[in-house]
Image (cartoon, coloured by chain):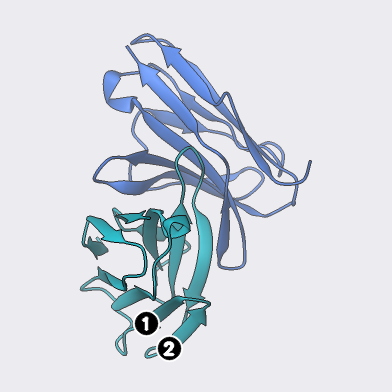
Amino acid sequence: TQLLEQSPQFLSIQEGENLTVYCNSSSVFSSLQWYRQEPGEGPVLLVTVVTGGEVKKLKRLTFQFGDARKDSSLHITAAQPGDTGLYLCAGEDTGGFKTIFGAGTRLFVKA
Amino acid sequence: DAGITQSPRYKITETGRQVTLMCHQTWSHSYMFWYRQDLGHGLRLIYYSAAADITDKGEVPDGYVVSRSKTENFPLTLESATRSQTSVYFCASSALDEQYFGPGTRLTVT
């Protein structure tokens, strides 16, 4: 069974600080996605990374896929209160069309 | 409106009752999914469907039944609800490798 472990589970920081969220597995994934979820809503896709070592930037968010395609990180620069939410990583199962989700990192950015 | 909708948004039911959660998408996506989200577990796949009349089990299918007679609809039925099925349920549809999620149904089984 493929598993994705996210760390930290919870993060509370001040506005303007930087942070990194990690997503790790012992399994290889064909692609990995990051979602953001706000209370009372479904997850919304932020980015998909496919190639080992790939780095994608989305404004203040930087996503990296590990060389071996087993892990990923999300770095937020100068966090803002609007970044508050649950961040989920999800891996595409190499054996079929299934997506495995991590338990999520709950981020709270204080003004 | 275009998109993916779920109904009801909130449901309280008693143990042993049958409950059906509805999911409707307007994009004609082939793939649709049902997940449950519980604290500490993230999203767990219950069932998915690759097309009308094609469904398959996910990680936690026990106690659930799905059907897909039309591409746009993917209802999830709890045949005899149990307290352990109290959760938030999300439906999603997929184009290529991106999943689009509905707003969720919060189900409480008393």
Q: Secondary structure at mark 1?
A: strand
In the picture shown, does residue A18 fall above or below B104? below
User: Color of chain A here?
Assistant: cyan
Say if mark 2 contacts mark 1, CB within 8 Å.
yes
Write down the residue under mark 1. A65
- B16 vs B33, left or right, is left
- Which image quarter: residue B110? top left
Which residue lies at the image location 38% right of the left edge and 55% below the top edge?
A: A111
Q: Which secondary structure, mark 2?
A: loop
| Chain B shade | blue
Q: Going 69% across and 54% down the picture, which residue do you hit?
A: B29
Parent chain of label 2: A
Q: Quadrant of residue A13?
A: bottom left
Query: Which mark is on residue A24?
Result: none
Q: Nearer the viewer, residue B61 or B35?
A: B35
Residue A54: mark in rendering: 2
Chain letter for mark 1, please: A
